[in-house]
Image: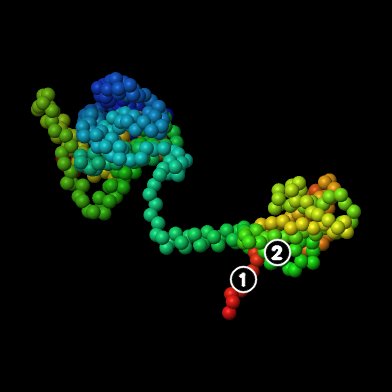
Amino acid sequence: MHPDLHRFLDGELPLAALPPELRAEAEEWQALLDAAAALGEERAPASLEHRVMAAVARMAPPLPAWRRLLRWLVAPRTVQVRPAGLLVAAAAAAALILVAWPESRPPLPATGAPGSAAVTASAEPAVVLVQFVYHGGAARSVAIAGDFNGWDPAHHGLRDPDGDGIWTAVFPVPVGLHKYMFVVDGERWVTDPNAERYIDDGFGMRNALLSVTPPPAPRRAS
Amino acid sequence: MVAWRDAKRVPSSIMSREIAAGQMPGDASDAHVVAAVRRGEREAFRILVVRYQDVLYRYALRMTGQPDVAADLAQAALVKAYGSLSRCRDPERFGAWLFRIHANGCKDYLKSRRRRDVSLDERPVASAPSENDPAAELERSELRTLLDEALARLPEPQRQAFILKHVEGRSYEEIAELLGVSVPALKMRVHRAREALRTVLEEVL
């Protein structure tokens, strides 16, 4: 095709500007393109709108991804669980907790009691009676404060009835690892010098550590 | 910016029905309608369906030559657009986005049809003559049928360019943006399509 014919069909050149020998061909092309343009008058079938909207009605609304996720999270749904699978999952979760949270493990057995905290079994397995002993010399009062009593010495005083400077008391302490200090004369915080282990208290002093273990199971009579 | 819509063909009854129902008016911008649909107003999507169904159908009809397939492809494109509406990054250009979905759908269909070895010669007559001036209309109808058959023989990129230019009457700038090609490259496709069309028509005639 002559380049001017393309320019005419592209609307860049009027028919009159074409060389006379091209005009007949240009008119034929124009008729053909008019027929092509008439194809552009065709309409979609009347049922198409209904079909599309019916299909759309069966679909979830086009929400953003975060809203779809939120909707999925809050929507109630039925979950089918096999009991055996549930047991396995529970066992796995318990194992994971024990691994990830060491304090949830049963505490190590106390190695004797050379220190001031002697452990005695109580009737309640989760709580053990512990005897605290303070050798501090002259004092008007001695009390114990630890994480097992909310660091409140008010109701955990030790006694020295014979005035020999040895203060003692027995308190129930939950099984586990605990931090504590003695409070002397209501104002002086003293680290137990006979504790087995210590840990910094974050204020420049050290807390004594007390490991309370469950009592051993009673032996059966043979 | 391409305003790929066919507003002049939206039946006025549709617009007045939407307005009377207290819903979004039929002449609301694409961006407004898309925002309403994204808010959960599913029925607002009908405005977009009415606005674009004809142009989608015609394009698919020219590309495939089969009215039933064209309607199915147009429906598939609209439904897919609805399902993916949250990913339409520029709602103002919803029409161009929708057309790309549709063009890809048509392309996939044509590929699968080639795999099934269905002859392009088995194309139905595209349109029937109207009752006004039956003789002249019959002649135009025959010409359209001939044109449809000739178009079916063009390579797909040339057919696509020719349809958008001469059937849909879009400017080169609009088509170039829709297809993601340069205007000179697009002009070359249309010119080649005309050359090929002339060759095909000479064979047929």
Tag 1: amino acid: Pro
Q: Residue at x 85, y 48 (%)?
A: A185
Tag 2: amino acid: Thr
Most extreme residue toward the right is A138
Number of numbered callouts drawn: 2
- Front residue of A147/A83: it is A147
Q: Residue at x 41, y 37 (%)?
A: A63
Image position of B37 (left or right of B150): right
**Separation of marks 2 and 1 at Cα, in angstroms:** 14 Å
Residue A158 placement (x, y as % from top left): 79, 54
Q: Quick one: quadrant of the C terminus of chain B?
A: top left
The residue tagged 1 is A218
Q: Residue at x 82, y 46 (%)?
A: A186
- Front residue of A145/B103: it is A145
State the mark number for residue A120. 2
| Relative height, residue A196 to residue B181 (above, below) | below
- Say whether residue B77 is visible: no
Residue B204 placement (x, y as % from top left): 17, 42
